[in-house]
Amino acid sequence: MTTAFDPIVLGGTRLANRLVMAPMTRSRAHGPGAEPTALMATYYAQRAAAGLIVTEGIQPSAVGQGYPDTPGLHTPGQVRAWRTVTDAVHREGGVIFAQLMHTGRIGHPSLLPDGLAPVAPSAVAAQGRVFTHEGPQEFVTPEELGEAEIRQTVADFAQAARNAVEAGFDGVEIHGANGYLIHQFLADNTNLRTDAWGGDTEGRIRFAVEVVTAVTEAIGGHRVGLRISPGNRYNDMIENNPGEVYGALLDRLAGLDLAYLHLMEGPDRTLTARLRSAWPGTFVLNPFTHPDVTGPDALKFVEDGSADAVAYGALFLANPDLPRRLSAGGPFNTPDPSTFYGGDHRGYTDYPTLAG
């Protein structure tokens, strides 16, 4: 029987175990350059016993930033600063992927350089508030992306992936979940377009397919993972038929030989099983445990074949040596909800979640 403590080869890289540290927004890239800090290098190196670390969301462009003090991967200074993080993780024997996250309509002009505003597939504001340096602010109506801007955004993802490799990352995870830009193209209430980037299922999945394809062409599919969250209502999302949309998405991506698919599961475990069956490669599961954090019980998903690896979020914050504690059956430090997001953005949105 395979267990979560067995090694696995991910895109040609051998992982010591099948325990993934899930991406979690920490808001610690203080300063105008949105560059990672020495504290962040220490934080990730402390958790290098994970089979795979997926970083907090990293904006691939200036306009992709949606929260205060989140890091980027679109300037030379950011690339240099991330190298200190990856070097620290590698010295501890860890493997680390950069999560590329464009937040789209989730954000606020006060978080962006002068003249920029949040963008989205359609000019539809999210219900709720976002945390800023001035406190919680209502989401604004985003600017609808034009064809040229969509193409530029795809190129931004690809360039950020190249920057990630230059910065020493072992790969990247494309964030297509949790109500951010890629998810906004997939969902019914955020993509009202009638052109080739919206409308029917093929149009809705097009942006996700083109981003993943461009990143794969830039750095190789063996270095690329994708995160999805079908039916997740976080950030005011509505998906009427996630089974059809995500089934079509996986069909289009199956031939790219990606490193993995990372599913942030909702309450519909039937859909999880369907997507697991449809995906030909490595399947990472962030199981639905709301309102509790993911705990030792989740190890069973590797044992019963529901997933190839399992992702832990909040428990990794409280327990940097989580693989050892899981193997020993505890004890576990209890996560403090007030620290889940560094700036605790959870209080200003309608659908709280534990991982970014």
Image: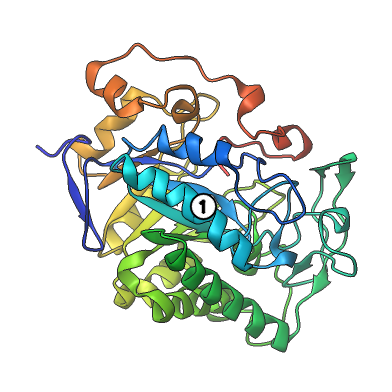
* Residue lying furthest top: 331
Horizontal side of 33 relative to 136 (left or right) equals left
Q: Position of residue 123 (x, y in %)?
A: 83, 69
Q: Position of residue 243 (x, y in %)?
A: 46, 60
**Residue 126, quarter of picture:** bottom right
Q: Position of residue 230 (x, y in %)?
A: 51, 54
Q: Mark 1 falls on what kind of element?
A: loop
Question: What residue is drawn where x is 45% and y is 42%?
Answer: 22
The residue carrying pointer 1 sits among few (fewer than 14), some (14 to 19) or many (20 or more) residues within 10 Å by Cα, namely many
Colour logic: rainbow
When the figure is inspected, residue 345 is found, relative to residue 157, above or below; the finding is: above
Identify the residue position indicated by label 1 in the image: 229
Of residues 252 and 11, the one nearer the viewer is: 11
Question: What residue is drawn where x is 85% and y is 41%?
Answer: 133
When the figure is inspected, residue 134 is found, relative to residue 10, above or below; the finding is: above
Question: What residue is drawn where x is 51% and y is 52%?
Answer: 229
**Residue 17, quarter of picture:** top left
Residue 208 visible (yes or no): yes
Residue 230 visible (yes or no): no
Of residues 255 and 237, the one nearer the viewer is: 255
Of residues 35 and 69, the one nearer the viewer is: 35
When the figure is inspected, residue 151 is found, relative to residue 93, above or below; the finding is: below
Horizontal side of 192 relative to 264 (left or right) equals right
* Residue lying furthest left: 1
